[in-house]
Image (cartoon, rainbow, N blue to C red):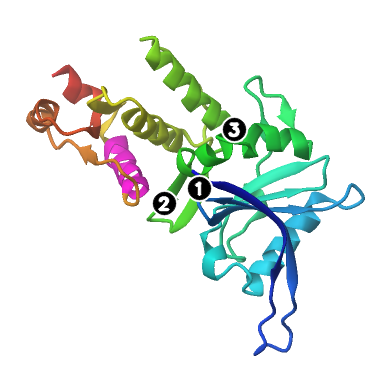
């Protein structure tokens, strides 16, 4: 891959709009020629939310169009406080979804240079865009994982290479389904010897719900998600040579 960093890109005003103005983007990270990560910076005398509001203004003015419609991640910082958020339309870019970064021991990383070293260097920036983002077809939006989800996925991957088992503990509303999907998806993609990735659920009501969520995530992805209608269907899917993600229940598995 080719990585490029540009600053002070000039987004020209729309001559047909008397209220339009020329704008300058602070920093943009391009991967293979596509501007995928946009960084808006303020000095220490201003809150980082000023950078967030500035991005929303740029979106409203139509500055993130053309090739810049490829942007998947926004980063805002006032040098001492740094957050990131998935790209979205201005009316959907909600400050509630701003996320800070933390290391594996849950220590916050707020300094903009420390954040860049942890999240925006190579290959971490590429991984954030490709491995730790999801295109949710049903919700029609990009989702970027939070740091605890990413650390969980990496821990599972590392354990799998050592043939170790374990568990991930998450609270309600922390994105367990999304974390589980990315675990199953990334293992299939990164370890070719894995033929099946199986997601077990303890009751049927969650079976349909989880399958629908997984399939919505997989619509624009490179993996196949299959549900099982009954035990015979599960056995058939186990026997085929298709690399796939299977969602089923512990009851079907025990039978």
Residue 143 is labelled as 1
37 vs 177: above or below: below
What's the distance in space between the residues labelled 1 and 2, CA to CA?
7 Å
Examine the structure image and report whether residue 209 is included in the region drawn in magenta. Answer: yes
What's the distance in space between the residues labelled 2 and 3, CA to CA?
19 Å
The local secondary structure at tag 1 comes to strand
| Residue 74 point in image, percent of width and height | 64, 52
Residue 147 is labelled as 3
Q: Are marks 1 and 3 in contact (CB under 8 Å)?
A: no
Residue at the (66%, 83%) spot, across then down:
14
**Crowd band around label 1 with a 10 angstrom C-alpha radius: few (<14), some (14–19), many (20+):** many
For residue 38, side relative to residue 252 (left or right)? right
Q: Are marks 1 and 2 in contact (CB under 8 Å)?
A: yes
Tell which residue pokes out farthest to the front in this image. Answer: 2
**Crowd band around label 2 with a 10 angstrom C-alpha radius: few (<14), some (14–19), many (20+):** some
| Residue 71 point in image, percent of width and height | 56, 57
**Crowd band around label 3 with a 10 angstrom C-alpha radius: few (<14), some (14–19), many (20+):** some
Residue labelled with disc 2: 136
* Residue nearer the viewer, 170 or 224: 224
The stretch in magenta equals 205-218
| Residue 199 point in image, percent of width and height | 30, 28
The answer to whether residue 171 shows anywhere in this view is: no
| Residue 251 point in image, percent of width and height | 20, 23
Main SS, magenta residues: helix
Picture quarter with the C terminus? top left
* Residue nearer the viewer, 177 or 84: 84
């Amino acid at each position: 891959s080719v990585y490029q960093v540009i600053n002070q890109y000039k987004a020209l005003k729309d001559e047909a709009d008397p209220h339009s103005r020329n704008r300058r983007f602070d920093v943009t990270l391009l991967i293979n020629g596509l501007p995928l990560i946009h960084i808006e910076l303020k000095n220490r005398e201003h809150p980082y939310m000023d950078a967030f509001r500035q991005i929303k203004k740029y979106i409203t003015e139509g500055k993130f169009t053309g090739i810049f419609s490829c942007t998947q991640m926004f980063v805002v910082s006032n040098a001492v406080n740094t957050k990131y958020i998935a790209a979205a339309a201005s009316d959907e870019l909600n400050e509630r979804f701003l996320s800070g970064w933390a290391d594996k021991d849950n220590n916050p990383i707020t300094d903009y240079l420390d954040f860049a070293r942890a999240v925006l260097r190579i290959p971490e920036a590429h991984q954030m865009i490709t491995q730790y983002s999801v295109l949710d077809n049903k919700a029609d939006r990009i989702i970027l994982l939070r740091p605890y989800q990413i650390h969980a996925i990496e821990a599972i991957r590392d354990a799998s290479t050592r043939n170790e088992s374990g568990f991930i503990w998450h609270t309600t509303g922390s994105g367990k389904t999304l974390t589980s999907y990315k675990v199953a998806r990334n293992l299939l993609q990164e370890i070719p010897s894995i033929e099946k990735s199986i997601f077990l659920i303890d009751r049927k009501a969650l079976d349909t719900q989880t399958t629908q969520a997984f399939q919505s995530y997989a619509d624009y992805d490179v993996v196949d998600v299959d549900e099982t209608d009954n035990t015979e269907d599960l056995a058939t899917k186990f026997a085929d040579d298709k690399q796939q993600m299977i969602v089923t229940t512990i009851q079907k598995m025990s039978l």
